Image (cartoon, rainbow, N blue to C red):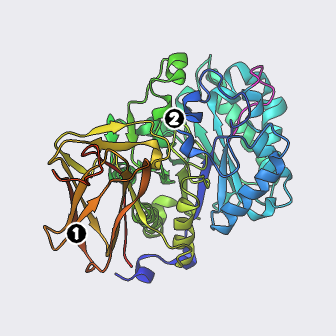
Amino acid sequence: MTDQQALNRASLPLIGAIRWDAWFPGNTYPGFVDPLLYTAYDFRKPFYGWFNSGIPEHAEIMDQEIDYASEAKLDFWAFVWYPENDEHPGIAQINGCLNDYMSSAKHHLMQFCLVLQTGWVAGKHLGSWRELFVPEFVEKMRDPQYVKVEGNRPLLFWMDTEFLDSVDKGFGCNWREELDYLTEQLLNAGMGKPFLVDMRHDYASALRFGLDGISDYGPASIKLKGHHAYAALAAHDREKLESSHGLQIVPGIGAAIDPRPRDLGEWTLQTGIQYGFSFELPTHDEWLEHLKSTCEWVQQNEKKAGSPGIVCIYSWNEIDEGGPGIVPTEQEGTYFLDAIYEVKTGKTRADQWNRVNDSNPMIVYKGEWESIFPHKGCYCNDITSSDAIGSSFSYTFNGTELRLIGGKGPDYGMLEVEIDSGKVRMEVDLYNIDAQPSIVLCSIGGLPAGKHILKAMLLKKHNWNSLGHKATLDAVHFRTE
């Protein structure tokens, strides 16, 4: 099947990304951001620094974010909304970026919608629902940039649907009346009723409360434990497309889900919650293929996916819970956005290498190896190290060119590197008088297109100046020339 046959770019779904905007100075409140993010995981820092709200240049940063997103052909942001009249000083600040977007001179370049949570619009805030919240929602939904489906129905994601009839967290027995009030106000404003989509992949609650669609919020539906390759996350996303139970499906797909900053750190101590799972970052080809195949599914399943079809990415900037997000970061650059552009246009925007971190479960280590984290100056702040002669690692890739990334230093030895059981073989001297934690150790090109196996092994011999036999792996890069 050719690219044009597989993906009709004249009728692509809208592609959006979730925003969680608690990125202001002092955001390490209990349950917000684990401070470990700013030290051990500092490679996730966005292009603008850690904060895009509560600082003097906040409006300028929003304009830059709009430029990055719109130039990559991202269609909309789904803003997780919080009440600005909440007594918690952190909660009251989260809508800062939404407000900047609404007032930006570049507002017209991006569409948007809202993500509401039962406990933040009802429960203790029930008294504000009709007086403050509904008028605000209606006013935002009147905006020409607000995403509409099925003609004139505002797209509205809803989290924690199961608590809609809760007395403490929701609307109690009046839940239907209160949702109908929102519909009534939208109709009075000349719009259709809201297109309500559960965003925790909670079919039972979505059906019980009469929602229109089903989606997901990144980690919400993940049951796996341990650390996994990205292929496991992509498979999880695909499994969610298999049954709709009569609801329309808004595929929620994960670009990056790695909440390890919150596991066993300050966040866990404060909340008592631990995730217990994480996924590797995707290679460029993995992310491109996952996004593309999801868009293809939406096009081929119009009755299930609605009109227009929508794909919602987790996430733009859930940087501590979700990995780097698709916002441009100091380490990843526009890596994720480039794939969106390619899906939308059919054109490659940048010369992309596939990057595989040393922690990837698809790398097979044999012998004695130690994972070291954090290790600053390395990709994702980690390396895998050994000084045991005969220890090896192997990785299977599909490409024509490869780069091996690792360290050199005064106590480093030599690696034997081979492709496809010796069709290409070389010895790499890792000695250097000064320590270099992450450099290109060797490059191999001119390989025939297709699948290849890389293997590297620590040798007994070493440079006569060296003090040892050490070798480290930081990453494997590969591509098709």
Amino acid at dot 2: Ala
Q: Is residue 48 depicted above or below 286 in this figure?
A: above
Query: Marks 2 and 1, how far apart in space?
Result: 34 Å
- Tell me if residue 84 is in the magenta stretch: yes
Q: Residue at x 40, y 66 (%)?
A: 285
Question: Could you tell whether 264 is left or right of 146 in the image?
Answer: left
Q: Is residue 146 depicted above or below 478 in this figure?
A: above
Q: In the structure shown, which secondary structural element does the residue marked by tag 1 occupy? A: strand
- Tell me if residue 350 is in the magenta stretch: no
Q: Where residue 149 sits in the image (x, y, percent)?
A: 64, 59
Question: Which label sits in the foreground, 2 or 1?
Answer: 2
Q: Nearer the viewer, residue 230 or 448?
A: 448
Q: Residue at x 14, y 69 (%)?
A: 422
Q: Quadrant of residue 171?
A: top right
Q: Where residue 283 sits in the image (x, y, percent)?
A: 41, 59
Q: Is residue 386 depicted above or below 304 in this figure?
A: above
The magenta region covers 80-89
Q: Nearer the viewer, residue 240 or 356?
A: 356
Q: Which mark is residue 292?
A: none
Tag 1 residue: 452
Tag 2 residue: 40
Q: Where residue 154 sits in the image (x, y, percent)?
A: 69, 52
Q: Is residue 257 visible?
A: no
